[in-house]
Image: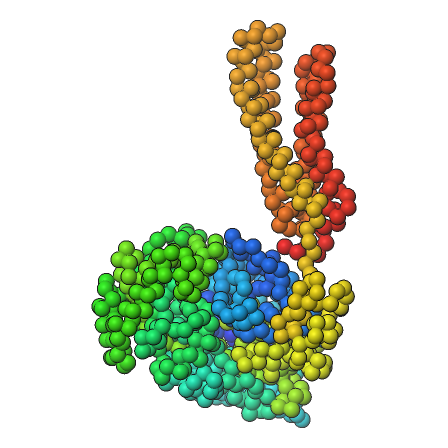
Amino acid sequence: MTSNETGRTEADAVVVGAGLAGLVATAELADAGKRVILLDQEPEASLGGQAFWSFGGCSSSTPRAAPAPGARLPGAGPPGLVRHRGLRPRLRPLAPAVGRGLPAVRRGEKRSWLKEQGIGFFPVVGWAERGGYNASGPGNSVPRFHIVWGTGPAIVEAFARRVRAAVEDGRVELRFRHRVDGLVVTGGAVTGVRGAVLEPSSVGRGEASSRTETGDFEIGAQAVVVTAGGIGGNHDLVRKNWPARLGPAPERMLSGVPAHVDGRMLQATEAAGASVVNGDRMWHYTEGIANHSPVWANHGIRILPGPSSLWFDATGKRLPVPLFPGFDTLGTLAHIGTTGYEHTWFIATQKIVEKEFGLSGSEQNPDLTGKDVRLLATRVKAGMAAPVQAFLDKGEDFVVADTLPELVAGMNRITGGTPELDLGQIEREIVCRDREIAHEFGKDMQINAMRAARNYLGDKLIRVAQPHRILDPAAGPLIAVRLSIITRKTLGGLETDLSARVLRPGGEVFPGLYAAGEVAGFGGGGCTATGPWRAPSSAAASSPDGQPAGRRRPRCDRRLGPTRAEPVGRSCDPHRPRAALRRPAADGRALRRAAGVRVSGPALGSAVGPPAPYGYPLPPRRPQRPGQVITAAVLAFAQSLVVVIASLYLWFFASIADAAVAEAGAPYSPTVVNALADEGVTLAVIQLLSAVALVASGVWALNSDRRGAWLLLVGALAVQVVLALYWGTRLQSLIGGVETDGTIAAFSLFFAAGPLVGLGMLLFGPGRRWFGATPQG
């Protein structure tokens, strides 16, 4: 970093905001050889911003990136139908400017890049939101939400480590307690930032810090990257932008983010001439509870519910289908706006709460955050998790009672009787619901959804309780929870193009200005703890022509943000006409051409299936596994059974060899007999191990097309041929010149026939070509 004669500091790039997006942008820019100054108004204790507090997760769109225990997953969906945390469909065509669509980044580049950072995932994949509408509606058809092993702190540390290394190398300078109040614009381009230096503060992470100014500063740079977060901590700004479609803005809300997530930099950037779009697009949760040990003002925690709790509005009416717990946040939020009240209620049993009440936030999940396998194992066992029990004991929103009258009375005490809940109305709803538990043919859609959820092994083990009657005394005491709206994500924000360059209101690029993370709109369908997958694209700031010197990621124009009212996808490429993508094509072919997808083969809607919903381009049909591969795997399974039986017989005869030889009076010495017995036992063990290899390789070959699966299966079958040859030769040597009439040869051929056929199918033709191509699973 340098300072000119006027005292103004100069750098290649200034990054405003030391949250997750800011850390990623800084790390990428530093790796590209740029000199970077990272500014933040908070003290160093808050490095990483709100991402540190998050549960952490990654939404993935393909089976390889989203393994679902006990569930058979379909192939990758159409590029435009990838949904992140329940968002409406959003078109991400294969834009020429990007080179491939977002799903390709998700299943390939993103996974490998995250692995490079040392970020891993919990093996049980969860649901972002289940949806509950028709197949073309919002939601997820399979579990796609991967929990980061270590949650938010692990993600922050992965990039903070890189930034600290760059600081030691002199490529990065960290300046905390520097609040940016405005952008320096020279000749129509952003050339720096100016603001105030705040007094030092020793407050802890997330706590409110002093705003007392001790001086001012100005920094010049070739590029300014804004990564200052959203508006969730500024309730006045949230209410100002509250969309009319969600009803009146709530007067009482909890904060899911610290107070410094205040939208100040968003307003300052807009004042400098940047375009802010979709200000009414927000993603606030409806399952908020007041933190019993708050870190910031109105600190709330979100319950991550399973599907079994009964959900009532403030007046005691059950929420309509499909507004079940964990199904549709925005639909529920809109419905709450029609009730005239701002809170709702969960009514559950202890069994439901034990199994289904997860809590969002790194500090509420000590097992995942601390990477404690032993503590994690307790999730499968019966019993209340310690963080949930703490809310039951100290939370102001919880009521625990043995009887329903006591429960309703406690609920009325919490709200002061505004409105007064009617015991009779709630009891009728619960009794009617409980009757539907008695058999599997009930009409209650929530119960049907609960049973369907348990078809997924991951949910059955740790997420969804066994369906039971709410009023069953054996299910434990009744538990009611008052739920409030909790602010969280900003979906609108600074308007950018695919290279993260901020645009002016007319659509032209604002030179020198870039944006990444939630300040440019959350919900792009990527993987960070609290921000979308686009932060690496801010490395474009390192090049004056807008091309990234580091990594580059797809980034959608914020004018095309997700909305419940606009199901038709639009192009994210500002240089391609959008009209071609606004209406569904007759058979989808014209749409695919417009999206840059090569069209060949039969028209969509014929042999390959119906046109995609809303005219989204369908992906190429997934290749089918050749019959030769399936046959070879089946032969491996059959051979393993033969080997196991033969091995057991061999071990048995070897174990009684001494007695059998002595009884028969055979002309063999004890030394020879013992050697043969030892040889038999060794061969039995080898054959049993080879049987395990046969089963493992067969299973792998039926579930993958990796080269390793082919090598293992070929090797396992080849071992069987070798064993057959060994047995033929060894038996012939043992019996000497005794005439066998071809019995030994027939035995060896029987033992080797299946493996030989399997090898032929794998070494030639489609069986060989299947493996080693582009991996499919």
Corner quadrant of residue 754: top right
Whether residue 205 sits left or right of residue 293 in the image: it is right
Q: Is residue 393 above or below residue 625?
A: below
Residue 766 image point, x, y percent: 75, 48
Whether residue 571 sits left or right of residue 379 in the image: it is right
Residue 304 image point, x, y percent: 42, 66
Residue 590 image point, x, y percent: 73, 74
Q: Is residue 16 above or below residue 632?
A: below
Kindly tell me whether residue 624 is visible in this rendering.
Answer: yes
Whether residue 65 sits left or right of residue 447 in the image: it is right
Residue farthest bottom in this picture: 187
Corner quadrant of residue 319: bottom left
Q: Nearer the viewer, residue 429 or 290?
A: 429
Kindly tell me whether residue 155 is visible in this rendering.
Answer: no
Q: Is residue 128 above or below residue 277?
A: above
Q: Looking at the image, which residue is at 69% across and 83% down?
A: 579
Q: Looking at the image, which residue is at 35% across and 57% down?
A: 438
Corner quadrant of residue 725: top right
Q: Nearer the viewer, residue 107 or 765?
A: 765
Residue 166 image point, x, y percent: 59, 69
Q: Looking at the image, which residue is at 58% across and 37% down?
A: 692
Q: Is residue 199 above or below residue 740?
A: below
